[in-house]
Image (cartoon, rainbow, N blue to C red):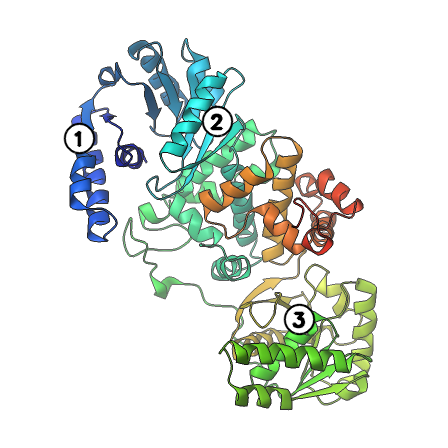
Amino acid sequence: MGAGIVEVFARNGLDVVAVEIGEAALERGRGILTGSTDRAVARGKLDPADRDALLGRVRFEVGLDALRDADLVIEAVPERLDLKRAVFAELDRVCKPAAILATNTSSLSVTEISVATHRPHQVVGLHFFNPAPVMKLVEVVRTVVTADDVVADVAALCARLGKRGVTIGDRAGFIANALLFGYLNHAVTMFEGGYVSREDLDVAMRAGCGLPMGPLALMDLIGLDTAYEILDTMYRRGGRDRRHAPAPLIKQMVTAGFLGRKSGRGFYTYEKPGSPKVITENVTKNADEVRGMEIGAVGVVGSGVMATGIVEVFAKAGFDVVSVSRGAEAAVRDRLTASLDRAVAKGRLDAAARDAALARVSYASTMDALTDVGLVVEAVVEDLAVKKALFTDLDKVCKPGALLTTTTSSLPVIEIAMATQRPADVAGLHFFNPAPVMSLVEVVHTIRTSPATRATARAVVERLGKTGVSCMDRAGFVVNALLFPYLNDAVRMLEGSYSTADDIDAAMKLGCGYPMGPFELLDVVGLDVALAIQRELYLELREPGFAPAPLLEHLVTAGYLGRKAGRGFRAVN
């Protein structure tokens, strides 16, 4: 990180004094900087002349006395409060009176660091993200005594460096880590409890949310020791929220020396310490090893966009499909035809395949048409009473051994299953919207679901060309259980006037690589949908931190539901 920050400043024409504690450490830092710039030249991202000029702007020195004439000093030493305070006390003695002192801490109190000096008004946080030359976000952290002109100067400097600076107060985790590490800790807890396998957990968040990495792979990249320290600091500084109390498994792994990529083993095992290559033969196998049954015809119950999308997915995969929509047959047929026509127009499907898919679909208004299907997918309104009544009827109509599945995104599958006399044949198949596009399907099993049903459901998902992940029947399953508490935390951050919606969105996109910021995503999903899911999570888990943010409830009450209403956290132009 220190070498990366040196590179950022030198790339932008600033003279830099790079300081280390000893010659060996200094040479190591010089090697990191040289290696980074050489790679940039090899990839055509930097001219050799510019590299030489960049390196020429850097002076390497041992000891803090070399910083006497610096206008700005950025500390990037290990994340230990006692060490940082000692460094700042020495910087205060060495540096000229006008110098600004900045810390790159990602979780420690900038205030506690600043009071080790006689100039706390000139101390600020400048939290760069790793790798610093690439990541565009810098969190500018002001304390209650940081001078306004100091904040303005460093914010302007961030712009000069080509970075997006977001200015915030001194709070545990700042923006990105405060939102990120609660999510990571929750993911570890789910894995630790045997709720979902590590591979399915990571795949779910990549495929379901478009994240660049799954949470456990990201923990390995960050380092489990680093993650533990950040979570522990956030827990102690952030009101002792249990969601930030490090999962016991993290402490156990750190104690055992399983620190992630840097040690060669964390949640995954790597080819060697520092390598990103996972040893594939050590990857755990899915538990669904029982052979499932062959599925012929499929029934889809529902008339909405999701139901139509599921009909399309099965028909394109070669299944004969019976669409039951209780009087909306023409609307479903028209919507399906229009979707397939668009796919042909965009070159994603040829006309013959479209015609074949349409020919595989038959339409009915009553469930009596489902007597011979091997699998039923329910995609009706997200109302438990409606779904239970529907499954009671399906139980009477469908042949013995037929799989009955629900696409619910938040309701308990076990309650739906127990409305039948065959709970062993009931599972969740949670498709994501739009079903023809989104690759993920969560295969949800209850404590009554048979191994054969689980295996059949996974096999069907594979035949559809989708990515299936297995999980137990718990509120939110995998994706929503991790996604919506993160979104709720972002609303609480906004509600507390800690930062703006724009800055929070920028922090998560630029600092964590998320495809959308939390408020952009909430407006797309719908604030009413988010509130309903968060209420289900809170009702089941009874964790105070999962209680819906009052601001979210107020916006829904006011009718500000997001894009579909023309206004949510932002007005739609």
Left or right: 305 as drawn, with respect to 71: right
Task: Identify the residue position indicated by label 1 in the image.
Answer: 24
Marks 2,1: beta carbons within 8 A: no
Q: Which of marks 2 and 1 is nearer the N terminus?
A: 1
Position of 236 relative to 554 (above/below)? above
Place of residue 487 in the rendered image (x, y in percent of width and height, measured from the top left): 62, 46
User: Real-space Cα distance between discs 2 and 1?
Assistant: 32 Å
Left or right: 110 as drawn, with respect to 360: left
Query: Which of 95/28 is in front?
Result: 95
- Mark nearest the camera among 3 and 1 is 1
| Element at label 1 | helix
**Residue sitting at 46 percent across and 40 percent down?**
251
Q: Earlier in the sequence, mark 2 or mark 3?
A: 2
Callout 3 amino acid: Thr
The image quadrant where one finds the N terminus is top left
Question: Which label belongs to residue 522?
Answer: none
Question: Which label belongs to residue 141?
Answer: 2
Marks 2,3: beta carbons within 8 A: no
Place of residue 271 in the rendered image (x, y in percent of width and height, measured from the top left): 29, 57
